[in-house]
Image: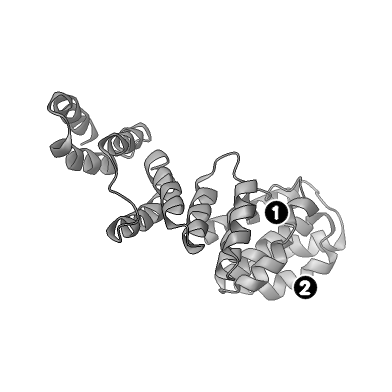
Amino acid sequence: NSLLREQRADRILAADAADGFGQNAGAAQLANLVAGGCIAAQPSDALKKAQPHAGELADYVRYLLALSYGGQGKAEQVVATLKNFGKDTPESVFARDVVDIYGNALVATGKAQEAIAFLEENRSPTRADVELALGRAYVNAGQQAKGGEILRHLYITMPSSAEADAAGADVRSLEASGVLPPPVYGERKQRATLLTQANKFADAAREYKALIPDAPPEERPALQVALGSAL
């Protein structure tokens, strides 16, 4: 996920450089770093050198620097780098991308309650990465049931998201420990249906196979048809 974020940021930087965005020494230096692959090779050092002269690209540098620190497990530096990012650069293309990164870093530094407040404030529009961070923040803050319900809602209603598997693993752990009850039939059916709609047929087929034995008799024929369509 971090690699995908870096690749997206690199594409945006390269495109802006090609369009002549931010014509100053800092912008040129940063564009050269991206083009030369220096950010991937020595991310923190390269970005810190570019940061004082980044100018209009300051938000790009902060975002990439936070990703770099996160990849090194330096949560304190992530928090310091992204603090007040939304207020400082409200128009940044990364304004939404940093929300879960900052929230997760707060949790990692023992500030789960602060993470909850921040993530709740930035929860709309709904994003799977933010929901995963929020659910885990509640769990880490000792509100396991509330966090578990958020994670389950993500797992059920956004099953094709990149975060669904991680949420599902957390949910199963909470179910095994007795914090959460097992999912009800309607939730399981909803997940299978949404997987089918997202063309995740292999996953949908597994859900239908597990669902059919627990289905009301009158619903089993329709589920068998849905399973056949997914195979």
Q: Position of residue 20 (x, y in %)?
A: 81, 49
Residue at image location 71% in from the left, 72% down from the top: 46
Q: Which mark is residue 165?
A: none
Q: Position of residue 100 (x, y in %)?
A: 58, 55
Q: Count of labels shown?
A: 2
**Amino acid type shown at disc 1:** Leu
Q: Is residue 1 left or right of residue 81?
A: left
Local secondary structure at mark 1: helix
Residue nearest the observer in this picture, 93 or 109: 109
- Vertical placement of 171 versus 42: above or below? above
Q: Position of residue 82 (x, y in %)?
A: 70, 61
Residue at image location 20% in from the left, 33% down from the top: 227
Local secondary structure at mark 2: helix
Residue nearest the observer in this picture, 224 or 24: 224
Q: Position of residue 88 (x, y in %)?
A: 80, 54
Residue nearest the observer in this picture, 86 or 36: 86
Residue 186 in sight in this render: yes
Residue that badge 2 annotates:
49
Q: Is residue 190 left or right of residue 157?
A: left
The answer to which quarter of the image holds residue 221 is top left
Residue at image location 12% in from the left, 27% down from the top: 217
Q: Which mark is residue 13?
A: 1
Q: Is residue 197 left or right of residue 64?
A: left
Cβ–Cβ under 8 Å for marks 2 and 1: no
- Vertical placement of 177 versus 151: above or below? below
